Amino acid sequence: MTGADRSLDAVVVGAGFAGLYMLHRLRRLGLSARVFERGGGVGGTWYWNRYPGARCDVESLEYSYQFSAALQQEWRWTERYSTQPEILRYANHVADRFSLRPDIEFNTRVASAGYDEAAGRWLVYTDRGQRISARFLIMATGCLSAANTPDFKGIDRFRGETFHTGDWPHEEVDFHGKRVGVIGTGSSAIQSIPVIAEQAAHLTVFQRTPNYSVPAGNGPLDRALEREIKADYAGFRARNKLMPVGFGSRHPRREDSALAVSEEERQRRYEEYWRLGGLLFMGAFADLGVNAAANATAAEFIRRKIHQIVKDPQTAELLCPDNVVGCKRLCADTGYFAAFNRSNVRLVDVSQRPIDEITSLGLKAAGEEHRLDCIVFATGFDAMTGALLRVDIRGRGGERLQDKWRAGPRAYLGLAAAGFPNLFLITGPGSPSVLSNMLPSIEQHVDFIADCLTHMRGVGHQTIEAQQAAEDDWVQTVNNIAAGTLYPTCNSWYLGANVPGKPRVFMPYLGFPAYVAKCEQVAAEGYEGFAFAG
Ligand code: N01
């Protein structure tokens, strides 16, 4: 292609877990590939989300790669749920173990990419002025990697320090002696608040919507369990693959309805699953995600727990959500509700009167000025589409992905978009991604793409493109499945409802095993729903 500095088989955008494994597979196929990463290191989400208390809500023995049996055996996790520093160490270990770094360009953002139909190649531009011609463009940009800071009035006037949980500084942040404000009460806030509360002179939490949270039950990794799993890791992975969310096979989801048992049994079951911890709580009964009356019994159980933990009844009541449990992602915490018993922590309800403005000295909310030294925006992400659409991607006829997705994202299997030949999305909208265990979902997508490239090479195809009809059907399928659940009943980031003006479309595909089966069937039938050329 004319004007390119360099020609490659594939450009991969992002060096998180998806980009790292994609690079490994591409190399093994003998293809030339380069990864461009805006951060200064590998790890993606785990490179940026360094806020105090950050850790994963899927168990470490499951939130890890399985493509290498040796890697799986040799890596030792220290806790049941890994901390962000440990996950980042793991990502770095993988990059070194498989010698991936020479093909990764750090501190380099892919700004735009345009498809040249005549050449059948992508021309990719970086913010450092590079122009790369590539046959394939593979977006490994992550689902929760574009931080969202609401457009608060006066945000630039604040004289203190500001932080975003999803874009945390790499230097140590010390809140000792400081008056800190945290805006938001999602997973990031719920993990960071207990830690910040221990340091800060005073902490004010600004809550618009309370969230359900279940204690994670974290602790040192049980070495006997580790030995047991490592003795048959493949079997363990295979059992997890059959779980609706792709993890948790050690704690089977129950088959019965919350409404089919006695009140006594229901409470006993909820206690059992409360002790299991975190996301596993949702497995207590089979119908918590689909039956509002069943879900209401779980909601009542958690609200009672909040009232038991939080001493001030008014604060406890404010912390009690009234929506469906799990409709916004259920949080997993370590000491979240108890943090509100501390004398240096205050909860401010901004549900009725939003935050008015940020001033030079703090923040005006609910008719009061709060003096602050630091503001932490725990305000989440432009999820699933944000990072993709921050790159100006233009397909056939110069069509912009931003325009194609103006009314909501449309992608076949969450992997490819009609009008954008030779573009692959790893864990894109329309795939299980955030409603599954991300690591196996990433590996499944990367393997699908690598197998597809092998197939193309075998039959001599130059381009692959999702067919419009297949894409339309798939978007409809994703919507139909979500509509049969309680997920669309609240303003979650799954729906894009957390970003003003973002179209409301339920983005993830619900059901990991069915999704994997569909991908396998598509591949077995010669990549049904895709068109090949060349
Ligand atoms: O973001 P969120 P997050 N004024 O969108 C509030 C994953 N994750 O970073 O609910 C006032 O959940 C907003 O209020 P509301 C996990 O999948 C995983 O916490 O929109 N408040 C909400 O309270 C998670 O779900 C882990 O009314 C405003 C908060 O900001 C996902 O990332 C850890 C506001 C945003 O919550 C996102 O979590 C961390 C405004 N104008 C994250 N705008 C684990 O693995 C927004 N808010 C455990």
Image (cartoon, rainbow, N blue to C red):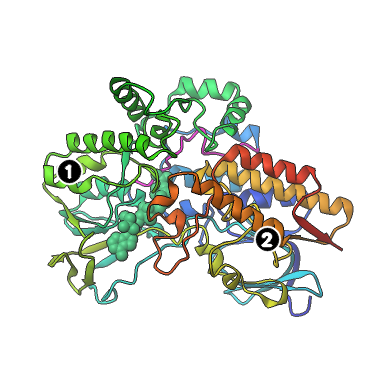
The picture places residue 497, in percent across and down from the top left corner, at: 41, 60
Q: 453 or 24, which lies in front?
A: 453
Q: Residue at x 50, y 54 (%)?
A: 506
From which residue to which does the magenta span run?
A: 53-67
Q: Is residue 110 left or right of residue 278?
A: right
Q: Is residue 499 above or below residue 394?
A: above
Q: In which quarter of the view is residue 525 placed?
A: top right
Q: 272 or 454, which lies in front?
A: 272
Q: Residue at x 47, y 19 (%)?
A: 224
Q: Quick check: marks 2 and 1 in contact, CB under 8 Å?
A: no
Q: 10 Å neighbourhood of mark 2: few (<14), some, or many (≥20)?
A: many
Q: Is residue 533 left or right of residue 340?
A: right
Magenta stretch: dominant secondary structure? loop
Task: Locate the C terminus and report the quarter of the image it occupies.
Answer: bottom right
Q: Is residue 180 left or right of residue 191?
A: left
Q: 91 or 356, which lies in front?
A: 356
Query: Residue at the bottom extreme?
Result: 3
Q: 69 or 309, which lies in front?
A: 309
Task: Locate the N terminus and report the quarter of the image it occupies.
Answer: bottom right
Q: Secondary structure at mark 1?
A: helix
Report the residue marked by disc 1.
316
The picture places residue 492, in percent across and down from the top left corner, at: 40, 54
> Hey, what amino acid is under mark 1?
Ala
- Magenta span contains residue 247: no
Q: Residue at x 64, y 32 (%)?
A: 70
The picture places residue 199, in percent across and down from the top left corner, at: 21, 49
Q: Is residue 340 above or below residue 532?
A: above
Report the residue marked by disc 2.
34
Q: Residue at x 68, y 60 (%)?
A: 34
Q: Quadrant of ligand 1?
A: bottom left
- Magenta span contains residue 60: yes
